[in-house]
Image (cartoon, rainbow, N blue to C red):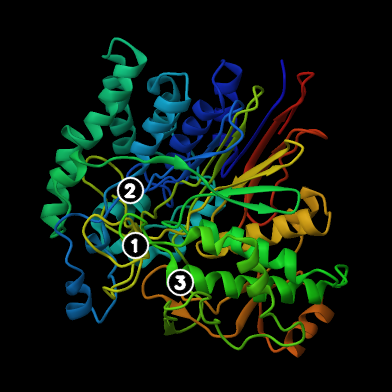
Amino acid sequence: MPGYCVSAGHPDAARIAASILERGGNAVDAGVAACLALSVLHAEQVQIGGISPIIVKMANDPSAQVVDGVGRWPAATRADVFRERHRGRIPVGIARTVVPGAVGAWITALRRFGTMRFAHLADPAARLAAEGFPAHRELVETVASHARSYLKYPGNARIWMPGGRIPDVGDQITYPELSRTIERMIAADRAAPDRESGLDAVYDLFYRGEIAREMVSHVADEGGWLDLEDLATHTTRVEAATQARISGGTVFTCGPWSQGPALSQALMIIERSLRGIPLEREGIFYHHVLEALKLALADRDALYGDPDFADIPMARLLCAQYAADRAGLIDGDKAHPALPHPGLPGAAKRDGAIGSDQMALDTSVAVVADSGGNVFAATPSDAASDGPVVPGLGFVISTRGSQSFVEPTHRAAAAPGRRPRVTACPTLFVHDDGRVVAGGGPGGDYQLQAMTQVLARHLFRGESLAAAVAAPRVFTQSAPQSSSPHLVFPGRISVEDEVPEGVFDDLVRRGHKAVRTPAAGVGKASLCLVSVGAGGDEAPADPRRASGQILQAGGGDVIG
């Protein structure tokens, strides 16, 4: 059979996606199955009740579509509570709960672009949760890093730290409550006469039926705002992806309710700032990337938010002249000491709380390209340590409200009905010859910076995708972090240990406050990518975190 590519945040999720393709499903079917599996295999950082932004490119469509997968603040939200009772912060716990968007995104993606029934795609996840799997290092390290947060909630501790103990690598992990929840969704589909009505039945169960009532009862007991009306009126958007022309192709991202368009802005600035620069000089390359990221993130911080509530000037931000103007601000010899001012008149620069780096909410990823030319990329997310688990359901309702701001004039302010401005941002690049590169990954704010560097190396320096993924990275901390309390360290950069000492010294000479950081580990930015089309297919593995890749060549060879 013709070939396919899969890359996912856990090897078993990749295998499950491949099995769906082998049974005749398309990329969207396989991608949703992988996301459901990740909500079990990475239940410490992916919730069925969380978020799942999706980007899809169907073979018959030259553009890409986004399924937003992000819920909104409840109608009863009062942001003044954060300002008056929590010192301007959005506290950990039920107060940051928003409508869960992942299930709506998966059902909507299947309805619009898929071919298989929900039950077929969810069954592997239900069996994994019931029968168990060996605890992997990332699960163990995540629980260890957040043990105090798990212990704060008895229900969470019972699931993720049974007996008050951090699991050991290799321990058998089961999630019986989560398995029963998925089985209830499977049963709703199987009781329906056909695929479409089955998808409706699963959606209704989760957003209007018994599961919805159990979520709302839990939130009420915890003193939160989410109610049945918030869930029943939830809608998932399918919209044209934000796009920008980059040398040799088009980059597609989620809209300004995510940080995605800042990737396009950064690449457009880098492309122009590097003209005439000796690209083989690593120190110069890193410097221009860092300065371009600062300029793009300055606009993200001041101008991005839910476009239903604010006028986001995306056409201006993604035009060639604006990118050239911003590139002209880069001093090739000297780093900007902090975050620059945003580039449009009237946009206010906002300062975060001065502080060191913090471990961000984490994420996983599923990327699938099928033999028919369809491509799916999703970044399902939301941590299990950030709020109380719903009794009997086995998941935490999305706490992604943490990626909002409490100032009422901020374009990403917490307010009734608004989507937070999320860090999760799957990306897709289409070369002019039709070749497609798609992916995403964990890492909070840093996932965008990692993808920027990989694509910049690949597109502007001609590096192979595998080499670009493996190359050492640097990250600016000059932009306020997306998650409350929005910490910032002006001028500071994190430099992966693998960056040579001479390059590190070069960055210091240019004024960067450089500190070393391990490349690998929990909370680090790691990417899963697939590349399909002219020249052959590939799914390079990022060495920073464990993941799974399966590439089936047209002749039937499978490379895992």
Q: Where is residue 385 shown, x and y percent of the image?
A: 35, 59
Q: Quadrant of residue 293?
A: bottom right
Q: Is residue 190 above or below residue 163?
A: above
Q: Nearer the viewer, mark 3 or mark 2?
A: 3
Task: State left or right for residue 468 relative to residue 515.
Answer: right
Query: Which secondary structure, mark 3?
Result: helix
Query: Which secondary structure, mark 2?
Result: helix
Q: Give the residue pinned by disc 1.
A: 310
Q: Tag 1 or tag 2, which sits nearer the N-term?
A: 2
Could you tell me if residue 383 is visible in this image? Answer: yes
Task: State left or right for residue 203 relative to residue 369.
Answer: left
Q: Where is residue 235 shown, x and y percent of the image?
A: 29, 40
Q: Residue at x 22, y 40 (%)?
A: 392
Residue type pointed to by label 3? Asp
Distance (Cα) linking label 3 and label 2: 36 Å
Q: Quadrant of residue 181?
A: top left
Residue type pointed to by label 2? Ile
Residue type pointed to by label 1? Ala
Q: Give the residue pinned by disc 3.
A: 301
Q: Tag 3 or tag 1, which sits nearer the N-term?
A: 3
Q: Quadrant of the N terminus?
A: top right
Q: Give the residue pinned by disc 2.
A: 159
Q: Residue at x 55, y 82 (%)?
A: 340
Q: Is residue 364 above or below residue 20?
A: below
Distance (Cα) linking label 2 and label 1: 40 Å
The answer to the question of whether label 2 and label 1 lie on touching residues, with beta carbons closer than 8 A, is: no
Q: Tag 2 or tag 3, which sits nearer the N-term?
A: 2
Q: Nearer the viewer, residue 349 or 365?
A: 349
Q: Residues within 10 Å of mark 3 (few under 14, many from 20)?
A: many
Q: Nearer the viewer, mark 1 or mark 3?
A: 1
Q: Residue at x 68, y 73 (%)?
A: 327
Q: Residue at x 71, y 55 (%)?
A: 455
